[in-house]
Image: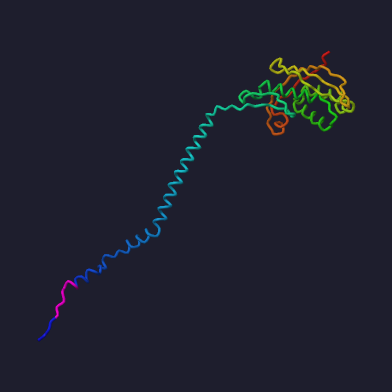
Amino acid sequence: MAIVFKFPRFERKHCEQAEPPSSEHNPYLAARREWDERYGDFITRARNWRTLALICALAALVSTSGMVWQSARSRVVPFVVLMDNLGRPLASGTSDQVGTNDDRLKRAALFNWIDNVRTVTPDPVAQRKAIDRVYGFIASGSEAQTFVSDFYRSDSPFKRAETHSVSVEVNSVLPTSDRTFEVDWVETVRDLYGAVKSADHWKASLTVAVNPPNDESQIRMNPLGLYVTNANWAKVL
């Protein structure tokens, strides 16, 4: 008697289904999946950073444009005060009032000019600087240049400083026309020990012209470009 063993067919079928057919494997998809897993996160973060940087740049541009627009519409007007070398206020006003044609600046410049030309000091360095400032405000070849040069030759401040000093107190600088000014001041003469010897009242008539400076040396010496073209003075008796 022969014994026959029969195995069910479903077991073979089950085994066959457990192994996926090789035709379903796609190397392109597998490589792309690998790429996404490795570099996708980096690409996403880089894209986010670029977007954020663009937003920040746009915000900065808008902010800067707003500040420029606001500054252009600013209603603040600077107030300018002209000071002399001793810190004394000589002229003042808003920036739109101050200019080379402003009589206040002209008066301040002539105030200093009279102070420099008439002062006598025992300090030779200070005296030389005062004389340089005087000529810095005189038109070259003008009658004022001749007048002042004759004054220095006939009454040298260096010679006078050996016996006395002269201080100047300007009382007023008044315009008499568009180009002429009248200056009123008091000169106090002191001996070398500081005792007052005399106090005299003086007046001067000055004619000026404006020639704006065109180089740095002229700007430093005479920033207004104001030049005395004619000068004369006399003691008031």
Give the tally of numbered discs.
0
Residue at coordinates 88% horizontally, 21% vertically from top-left? 197
- On-image quarter of the C terminus: top right
**How far across and how far down the image is residue 207, in percent?**
74, 19
Q: Does the magenta-highlighted stretch encompass residue 7?
A: yes
Rendered view: 230 above or below 60: above
Q: Does the magenta-highlighted stretch encompass residue 3?
A: no
**How far across and how far down the image is residue 27, in percent?**
32, 64
Residue at coordinates 83% horizontally, 17% vertically from top-left? 200
Residue at coordinates 47% horizontally, 43% vertically from top-left? 57
* Of residues 175 and 197, the one drawn nearer to the viewer in this rendering: 197
Q: Which residues are magenta?
A: 5-11
- On-image quarter of the N terminus: bottom left
- The image quadrant that residue 236 belongs to is top right
Q: Residue furthest bottom?
A: 1
- The image quadrant that residue 201 belongs to is top right
Q: Is residue 215 left or right of residue 120?
A: left
Rendered view: 219 above or below 28: above
Q: Residue furthest left?
A: 1
